[in-house]
Image: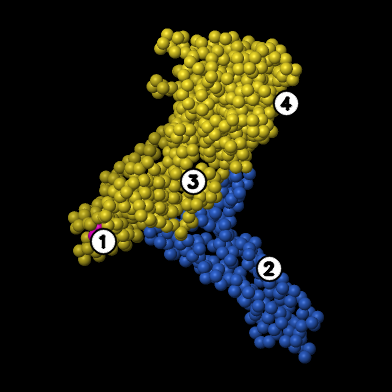
Amino acid sequence: MTTSGKSGAAPFRLLTLAAMALLAVAYFSPIWWVALTAPQYPPDAFPDGIRIEFHFNGVMNGCHTRPRTEIDVDNDEALDCVHEMNTINHYIGMKPIAEGAKYEIMLAPYLFVAMGLLLVAFMFYSGPFWWLLALPAILVPVGFVIDYSGWLWYFGHTLNPWGAFTVKPFMPTVFGEGKVAQFSTFSYPTYGFGLLVAASFALILAVLLRRKQLQGGRGEK
Amino acid sequence: MKSRLMKTTMLASALGMTAAFVGSAFADESLQDVMKRRNLTEENVLAAAKTYTPTGGRDEFLSFASGGQYGGVIVFGIPSMRIIKYIAVFNREPWQGFGYDDESKAILASSKTPEGKPITWGDTHHPNLSKTNGDYDGQYLFINDKSTPRIAVIGLKDFETRQIVVNPILTTDHGGAFVTNNTEYVVEASQYPGTLDRKYQGLDKFNDYRGGITYWKFNRQKGMIEPENSFTIELPPYSQDLTSTGKGPSNDWSFTNSLCTERYVGGIESGRPPFEAGCSAHDTDLLHVINWKKAEAVFKAGKVEKINGMAVIRLKTAIDEGLLYLVPEPKSPHGVDVSPDGKYVVVSGKLDTHDSVYDFDKMQKLIEAKDFAGKDPYGIPILDMKKSLHVQVALGLGPLHNQFDSKPCIVYTSLYVDSQVVKWNYCEGKVLDKIPVFYNIGHLMTMEGDTEHPKGKYLVALNKLAIDRFDPVGPLHPQNEELIDISGDKMKLLYDMPLPLGEPHYAVAISLDKLKPLVRYKYGTNSRTEEASPFAVRPGSEHIDRSPGKVEVFGTVIRSHYNPEIVQAQEGDTVIYHWTNAERAEDETHGFAVAQHDVQLSLEPGKTASATIQNVKAGVYPYYCTEFCSALHLEMEGYLMVAPKGGAVAQPAAFSTGQTYTKADFDKQYKENLDTQAVIDSVVAYITSVNYKDFPTVVALVSDATDQLNFAKDARAKADDFSKKGDWQNAMLWANQWWQYQVKAADIGLRAKTYLEQNGAKKVK
């Protein structure tokens, strides 16, 4: 409990601080993206397809204003692709995107603050199960994928029978490319997920350093 | 049911056979074969290659042609000559909802005659584009109506009419709309003289009649004409005609020609020679040379009289202030066009074989030296024609209009009587080339040909007669717009475009890359004003407001429903719909029509539009989407329910749907289903009899079909359950659902079968 200030303490704390910074940036970054392409969404007019991005603080529009081509159009507003995705999804009776992960999104700010507090404690606490303090933050990427997959399964298996087109319940693609009717689907992690993974690695390293330090400290005693 | 399926199958195979036949007959044709079969020369093929725009391709220029009697504007691409849009201006146009939605009705309401008469057509003549430093900037388009003297402003963000101003003192206008170099003013010249105060005065006092030229002040920021900052110069009762605004050194001046300076009044019914004879007696008419910059200063100094609300610079003031001069021009002229460098004014004689090129510098010197040849009967100084001229060139019969090339000194003139376009050099006064056109050309247009920097390349001949050029369609023939290649020394005719909507008098063409149109409106825009509509609502906050005698609906539309869908009203109510299209996807326009009512809205993504129905009559009126917006377009519907006075209004919970079914209905459906099943079984038997597992496409189809058949099985079980209980209503509904799944399965099965047959599936044992 009284290891602060000693040589060897700095690296693990620096790593922890770095991880906290990464997580803070990741909170506001897109973690995963999904895009649909289809013949009626030509690439010239829809350069991103119908793209949405999953953040911890909500599902955001992933479509940008279209690039200048041989014909210039007024371009001050990008297509709202969350809206467009909902419009497409309603044909097969899929729930609106806002239904997804609504509890997680509501809780996310508190969970992140709590995680931060745990990490602060991790920097200074050396009592029994000290490593548990860093565990939640290490598990964020894994947790995200599990939660994300869970919701995708839920969306694919709670199709409203009143949907105009009957499709059999399906599991939307979590990672990679898929095909639903004439739509090609793309689902990939983006830089926010990279930040989460980097934070995880930083924290794992911090835990290892801390363990070495604590063992060393105890050995000295 | 069997027969319905059979029909579908037969139709499908018939279509397939046709496609196969066409494919095999023409797939291997070479260019030479096609030329031979269609009797095309190499020149034809070259012309085709110069105009053909590959699928999905774009044009180089976009052209705006007046629609003549149509009252609007026609937009087409160059060189493809494909019509891309019609823009309603003075007319009602249901596709765009123009004159049908309350927002555009407000624009048409502002375009009534000064006496308040509504006019829902126009005789549009001369479109012109807004300019910055003498070149088109792609922001606004202006056009006049000759019949009721009006000028309209069209915004090029959405190609919609946003304003119409009515001239309160002129009888007619022909010489509009022309634009000064920085769009300070839109110029409108009267044609047939009249009384400026619009009061009756006998033709015996024709010499007291007046014409005028109105300079409408344009506010570019607002995109609107400001009548309060506009003025008119009073002119003698000559028939003023076309105008050209100055450029470069002549920037502050405008030039308007005139005909019938004889001030002749016909009266064929009382034995007087007709107008046409008396109006072409003199060898010359008079070109009006006006310093509009000076006129503006006179107007701002308040030296005007208000007539019907219009500030008028009186003829005497115009003469005293030295802002108005005349110069003789060849008999009954038509076109007057200032050269790109602003140094020359080219005038076509119409009844004279010459074009006259006036030297602006010479005229300026005469004006400065007050060296006048005389005065007209109204006291306007007249410059000496010979001293003003640079050169006169004999071009041919009936020269009408002039347009300039990108090459220096090159101008093209239309010859109406000769049916020709002549290319000539106005600096040297030399004819270079002539080409026949079909037939009787009026205006002609080169690319950005009336700006300081014409683009050359193409010329369009706007011919008045088509005669035998197109497939015969009865006595009323389309107009013929001909595309001519002017990039080389010799002009080459490339293409004839029929225009069957009205007579395009004039057209202007602008490089496509100067236009920046919208893809969608900002959510909740009144497109007619391009401002936020107070009636827009977001999805989730739709509502119906009721007050005595009035039902006001604030709704949204999106693929594929209206919200609200059922609107209850009482006979005699005023029902107002405000719809906002909640779509953001490009081109997802919805329509709105109320059956048996004069209501048709076009709701482009983001647009809010309103329709008011006064004094509704009792009855049941479906409303529906008039744009095929999605696979569920036909289901995009609602009901306006108008109860008789004093009658009860049904509550939604009490709606009964469908009809009551009996055992007989159920039995009939059940039998149909069994028949359908037999068809499905035969298809399944075929598929399983071949090596379908070798075809991944078919395997996927079979999997889909199997799903549908499983759903069908569920539905059948439910139908059986209910029939056992004697609940024929539900039994019938489920039997029908079962059939729905069967049809889907059959459709998939047939597609699989066709695929197998076409891809050489083999029998398996």
Seen at 55% across and 68% down, the residue is: A105
Disc 2: which residue: A22
Type of residue at label 3?
Glu
Q: Residues at marks 3 and 4, common chain?
A: yes
Closest to the observer: B63 or B80? B63
Residue B214 highlighted magenta (yes or no) = no
Disc 3: which residue: B604
The spot of residue B733 in percent (x, y) is 27, 58
Marks 3 and 4 sit apart, C-alpha to C-alpha, by: 45 Å
Type of residue at label 4?
Pro
Marks 3 and 1 sit apart, C-alpha to C-alpha, by: 41 Å
Q: Residue furthest bottom?
A: A221
Callout 1–callout 2 Cβ contact below 8 Å = no
The spot of residue B93 in percent (x, y) is 44, 36
- Chain seen in yellow: B
Q: Chain of mark 1?
A: B
**How many marks do you count on the picture?**
4
**Could you tell me which secondary element the residue under label 2 belongs to?**
helix
Closest to the observer: B188 or B344? B188
Disc 1: which residue: B730
Query: In the rendered image of this protein, which colour is used for chain A?
Result: blue
Type of residue at label 1?
Asn
Disc 4: which residue: B249
Q: Which residues are magenta?
A: B729-733
Marks 4 and 1 sit apart, C-alpha to C-alpha, by: 86 Å
